Amino acid sequence: MQKQTHSLPALISFFIPGLGQLIKGHILKGIFIWIFGGILTFFFWWTIIIPFILWAWNVYDAYNS
């Protein structure tokens, strides 16, 4: 069985984190990204690397899961 990728949800998650997961039907994961990602980004915005890692993982997850 070949692994399916999702380009449109990844593109949407590129601009709005978590929305790609919601479009694919992963409701809890999308809400988790909004809440957890928002909290971590709020507290660690000055590091730049933590928000970037969360954003990159979000796009990767929307593309591959």
Image: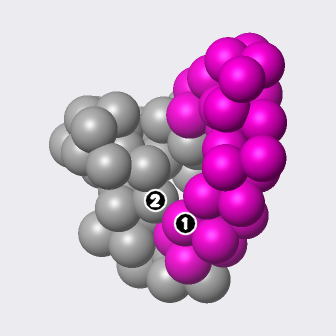
In terms of sequence position, does the residue under pointer 2 or pointer 1 come before the other?
2
The N terminus appears in which quarter of the rendering?
top right
Q: Identify the element where label 2 is drawn.
A: loop
Mark 1: few/some/many CA within 10 Å (<14, 14-19, 20+): some
Magenta region: which residues? Answer: 29-57
Q: How many marks?
A: 2
- Tell me, yes or no, if residue 19 can be seen here: yes
> x, y (%) of residue 11?
26, 35
Label 2 amino acid? Gly
Mark seen at residue 17: none
> x, y (%) of residue 64?
54, 40
Mark seen at residue 34: 1
- Tell me, yes or no, if residue 53 can be seen here: no
Label 1 amino acid? Trp
Q: CA distance from mark 2 to mark 1?
A: 6 Å
Mark 2 and mark 1 residues within 8 Å of each other at the beta carbon: yes
Left or right of 40? Residue 12 is left
Q: Identify the element where label 1 is drawn.
A: helix
> x, y (%) of residue 4?
44, 43
Residue drawn at the location 55% of the way across and 66% of the way down:
34
Mark 2: few/some/many CA within 10 Å (<14, 14-19, 20+): many
| 52 drawn magenta | yes
